Image: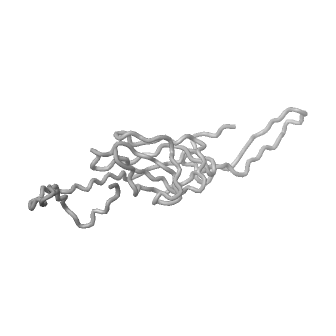
Amino acid sequence: PVDTALLSYTHFLVYASSSFMEQTTPANHKIFDASGSGSIIVFVDRDLDVAEVGGVITWVPPTYTNRVEAYLVFFAQSEAGLERSQVGVEVIAGKNELSVPAETPLALHTHVVVYTRSSLVEQTTPAAVSLTDMFASIVGASFPDYDLDAGDIGGTLSWQAPSDYSLVTKYVV
């Protein structure tokens, strides 16, 4: 069955049996415990609104990918995948990125978790990375109106740049 603990076992032994007797020399098969977890998850939030995210999630595939059919990506409240919410759809093996649309609500999520899925089952322990909500709001906006005609304005709009403006490419007024 799925999720059977391996413990210290190394082989399967298969005995043939009849109504009279069980075979004394079994066939054996060495157990290969397939492990297929992604790693090095990277997500840079490029949506600069508070409590919203957007950008591209990437990860490094497992070394052994023969049995990996897909990846499932979630936002979660822990690195173990607590209270997870799926991001997009399954990503077919061979592709190691998923776009997150701008203005995706962050809710109470604190991590990005990536699970692998085989033809049998979804992995129980995900790869995880902490989620950082980037935001960049201007402060101290000022516009003194020097045009003295009613219905017209004129002057200079000014503001202070956000403390972290590394992702700001332009300001739209």
Give the number of callouts. Answer: 0
Q: Vertically, is 130 above or below 101?
A: below
Q: Residue at x 48, y 43 (%)?
A: 56
Q: Nearer the viewer, residue 160 or 114?
A: 114
Classify residue 12 by image quadrant. bottom left
Left or right of residue 63, residue 87 in this image: right
Residue extending farthest to the front is 19
Q: Nearer the viewer, residue 147 or 166?
A: 166
Classify residue 145 by image quadrant. top right
Q: Nearer the viewer, residue 167 or 120?
A: 120
Left or right of residue 41, residue 27 in this image: left
Q: Nearer the viewer, residue 97 or 83?
A: 83
**Which quarter of the image is occupied by the C terminus?**
top right
Q: Vertically, is 101 above or below 126?
A: above
Classify residue 169 by image quadrant. top right
**Which quarter of the image is occupied by the N terminus?**
bottom left
Q: How is the image coloured?
A: one colour
Residue extending farthest to the left is 25
Q: Residue at x 50, y 41 (%)?
A: 88
Residue extending farthest to the bottom is 8
Where's residue 60, x and y in %?
A: 36, 48
Where's residue 166, x and y in %?
A: 54, 48
Q: Residue at x 60, y 48 (%)?
A: 105
Left or right of residue 81, residue 154 in this image: right
Where's residue 67, x and y in %?
A: 29, 45
